[in-house]
Image (cartoon, rainbow, N blue to C red):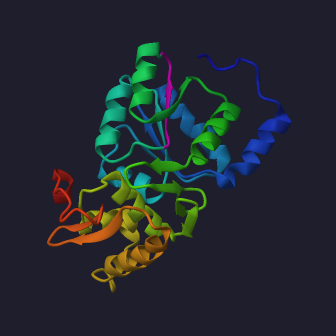
Amino acid sequence: MRPSTSPPSPAGDLELVSAAQAFAPVLVVAGSAEGQSVLGLLEAFQVEVRCAEKPGWDEVAFALRRSAVVLIAGCSDPVSMAKELRAAGIDFRIGVLCERMGERTREELLSLGVKHCLRLPVSRGELARELTRLTLLKRECPSTGFTLDPLLHTVSHAGKRARLSPHEFALLQCLMEHASRPVAAHVLKAIGWGPEMPRKSKEQILTVAICRLRRKLKPLGAPYQLVTVRNTGYALSQPSRERPDVPETAAL
């Protein structure tokens, strides 16, 4: 799938750039000079950007906390990178930009949660359209029954909807990534607040946020509830289950 060689119309390009304020933050996983060129194009959109050749904990926390779009750009092995991101809890709003991509690679990427695949190089207009598609994606989680809208910061179930704060949204997204499995409290703090965590209320801030989130989820009537797992953290769990499974992620 080759990008169009014809330049985008100036008017259409300007409209896309003017909509930049609606774009989600972006994490760029750049594995080549061609992938790095995407950063120059992103500057025109005035969007918050992080870049890493190999994302670590800080980049993963940023992506989950900010509901970021993730662009794997110019990596020699995009499939392995997509698998690493998925293992870290990122399997949503991912786009891949590669110089060459076979159909088998494309199908494997799609099976790993990648939403769109484009050929490098890309124009500013093509990148803007890609960001728009990924930004507007809603996250559906059939196992929990919840649907997240990252653009509006809402969660819905069976036609009912609740608006969440950015911190509550980040916490729920992380808990949905590990449905039925507990997530350690310090992991949730890093996802929800990161370096913005207030020192004075460090011990209470997660407890208060969880209580508020629990109150907002209850009226939705979803089959999963937000429960406290003793000596571990929190989890989304079905009421019929006595205790969620304890995965390795709980020890992060």
Residue farthest toward the right in the current orientation of the protein: 11
Q: Where is residue 95 in the image (x, y as percent from the top left)?
A: 50, 35
Is residue 200 shown in magenta?
no
Q: Name the one closer to the observer, 44 or 25.
A: 25
Quarter of the figure that contains the N terminus = top right
In the image, is 134 to the left or to the right of 192?
A: right
Q: In this view, does 105 lie above or below 78?
A: above
- Identify the residue at image location x=37%, y=56%: 176
Quarter residue 12 falls in: top right
- Identify the residue at image location x=25%, y=63%: 240
Magenta segment, principal secondary structure? strand
Q: In this view, does 92 lie above or below 230?
A: above
Q: Would residue 189 be visible to someone looking at this image?
A: no
Q: Where is residue 45 in the image (x, y as percent from the top left)?
A: 66, 47
Q: Where is residue 25 in the image (x, y as percent from the top left)?
A: 54, 52
Residue farthest toward the front in the current orientation of the protein: 240
* Stretch of the chain drawn in magenta: 93-100
